[in-house]
């Protein structure tokens, strides 16, 4: 990947212990333009790297204690989330909406010029009319972020996120999707995205600042990845 000349960035990651957040962390630590990575975590990442600083924080309903940590940051990548059905409806709303808004509030106060990269989901509905709670809640979070005052907010509406590495799937639907992924990818390529590709797009957009946004549907994310990471490089890595 050929990078334009840009200043070194300081970024903060929320959700680095999750599937996409884990790839965001790896990519950010290896990225030549990123000078430091602050991971806000509830448990240790088990990773040692000269760029990395872990900050433990348990209550995302109140991020006031993070004000000093979030000072002087250039960007944030927010990947914190929960699967529908894995938690109660009230917890899903708290994690998806309340935690996002609270973190953004403190980041905005500490680093008003920071960019914000947010992991949303396909079908997110800012109008609140969707029958799906996940879609309504992601849309609610998007709506607040877009008027929060950050100079740049990037919304990533990923469709099915392929885990890449083996894991315990959260439910039968995800087990089925993983099993059928090779066919699904050929027939409906714009309805799937690899977790590592999604992570790279979420980091690249805040580092390079070249994408228009603010909302990227799954098709847009795939296009972004293909333009910055040519297929030849993927083939050399033995990708599917």
Image (cartoon, rainbow, N blue to C red):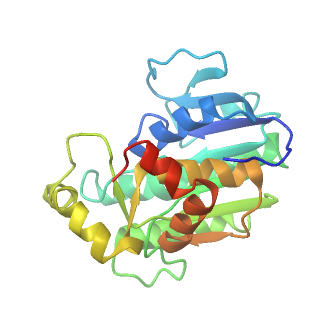
Q: Is residue 49 above or below residue 162?
A: above
- Residue 54 can be seen in this image: yes
Depth check: give the residue in front, 185 or 172.
185
**Which residue corresponds to the image point at 45% horizontal and 64% vertical from the top-left?**
158
Residue 148 spot, x, y in % from top left = 74, 61
Callout count: 0
**Residue at x 58% of width, y 30% of height:** 39
Q: As drawn, is 180 to the left or to the right of 210?
A: left
The residue closer to the viewer here, 213 or 137, is 213
* In the image, residue 162 above or below residue 142: above
Asked if residue 88 is positioned above or below residue 159 in the image, the reply reads above
Nearest to the observer: residue 94 or residue 123: 123
Which of the 4 image quarters holds residue 107?
A: top right
Image quadrant where residue 205 sits: bottom right
Residue 139 vertical position relative to residue 115 in the rendered view, above or below:
below
Please report the residue visible at 76 percent of the width from the left and 47 percent of the height from the top: 3
Query: Percent position (x, y) of residue 184?
Result: 25, 69
In-front residue for pair 60/166: 166
Q: Is residue 143 visible?
A: no
Percent coordinates x, y for residue 150 in the rendering: 78, 57
């Amino acid at each position: 990947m050929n990078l334009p000349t840009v200043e070194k960035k300081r970024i903060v990651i929320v959700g680095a212990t999750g599937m996409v957040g884990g790839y965001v962390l790896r990519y950010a630590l290896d990225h030549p333009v990123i000078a430091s990575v602050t991971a806000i975590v509830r448990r240790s990442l088990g990773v040692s790297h000269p760029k990395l600083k872990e900050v433990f924080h348990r209550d995302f309903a109140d991020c006031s204690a993070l004000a000093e940590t979030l000072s002087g940051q250039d960007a944030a990548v927010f990947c914190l989330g929960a699967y529908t059905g894995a938690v109660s409806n009230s917890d899903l709303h708290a994690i998806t909406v309340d935690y996002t808004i609270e973190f953004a509030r403190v980041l905005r106060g500490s680093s008003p010029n920071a960019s914000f990269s947010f992991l949303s989901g396909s079908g997110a509905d800012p109008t609140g009319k969707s029958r799906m709670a996940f879609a309504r809640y992601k849309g609610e979070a998007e709506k607040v972020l877009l008027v929060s005052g950050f100079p740049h907010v990037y919304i990533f509406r990923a469709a099915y996120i392929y885990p890449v590495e083996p894991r315990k799937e959260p439910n039968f639907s995800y087990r089925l999707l993983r099993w059928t992924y090779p066919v699904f990818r050929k027939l409906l390529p714009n309805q799937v995205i690899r977790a590592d590709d999604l992570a790279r797009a979420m980091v690249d957009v805040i580092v390079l600042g070249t994408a228009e946004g603010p909302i990227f549907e799954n098709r847009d994310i795939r296009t972004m990845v293909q333009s910055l990471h040519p297929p030849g490089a993927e083939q050399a890595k033995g990708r599917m």
